[in-house]
Amino acid sequence: MKFRDQSSEIKDREVDRMKHLLRSALRPVDPESDVNRDLWPAMLRRMDEQSVRGAARVPWFDWALGGALLAFAAVAPRTIPVILYYL
């Protein structure tokens, strides 16, 4: 029974030590900071901006790659199932 009490006491000291180390490592949060503002409206606004741009945001290399893929499929139509398999 004495061994069990010692181990729980050691665990309690370790837990207290870890709490102290964590509290000393992290700075306290200022209650007056900008943490209180809601970020969801800003996120919705940003998502709307990105959806308005649509196809204009696709890089030119993607369009060139798609064109080359279509040209290759037109030249060698037997490769269409293979191309579709890897897509």
Image (cartoon, helix red, strand yellow):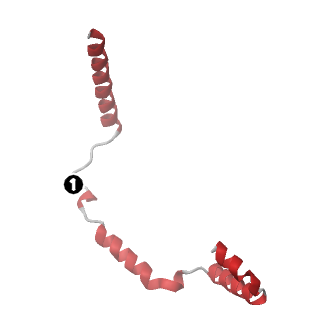
**Residue nearer the viewer, 12 or 52:** 12
Image quadrant assignment for residue 2: top left
Could you say whether the residue bearing mark 1 is in a helix, strand or loop?
Answer: loop
Image quadrant assignment for residue 6: top left
Q: Which amino acid type is marked by label 1?
A: Glu
The residue positioned 27% from the left and 59% from the top of the image is 34
The residue positioned 68% from the left and 86% from the top of the image is 67
Residue 75: x, y in percent?
Answer: 78, 89
Residue 33: x, y in percent?
Answer: 25, 55
Image quadrant assignment for residue 61: bottom right
Look at the image and tell me in which quarter the N terminus lies: top left
Residue sitting farthest toward the right: 75
The residue positioned 33% from the left and 24% from the top of the image is 14
Q: 39 above or below 15?
A: below
Residue 42: x, y in percent?
Answer: 32, 71
Picture mark count = 1
Q: Which residue is mark 1?
A: 32
Task: Classify mark 1: residues with Cα within 10 Å, few (<14), some (14-19) or many (20+).
Answer: few
The residue positioned 30% from the left and 68% from the top of the image is 40
Residue sitting farthest toward the top: 2
Residue sitting farthest toward the bottom: 74
Look at the image and tell me in which quarter the C terminus lies: bottom right
**Residue nearer the viewer, 75 or 34:** 75
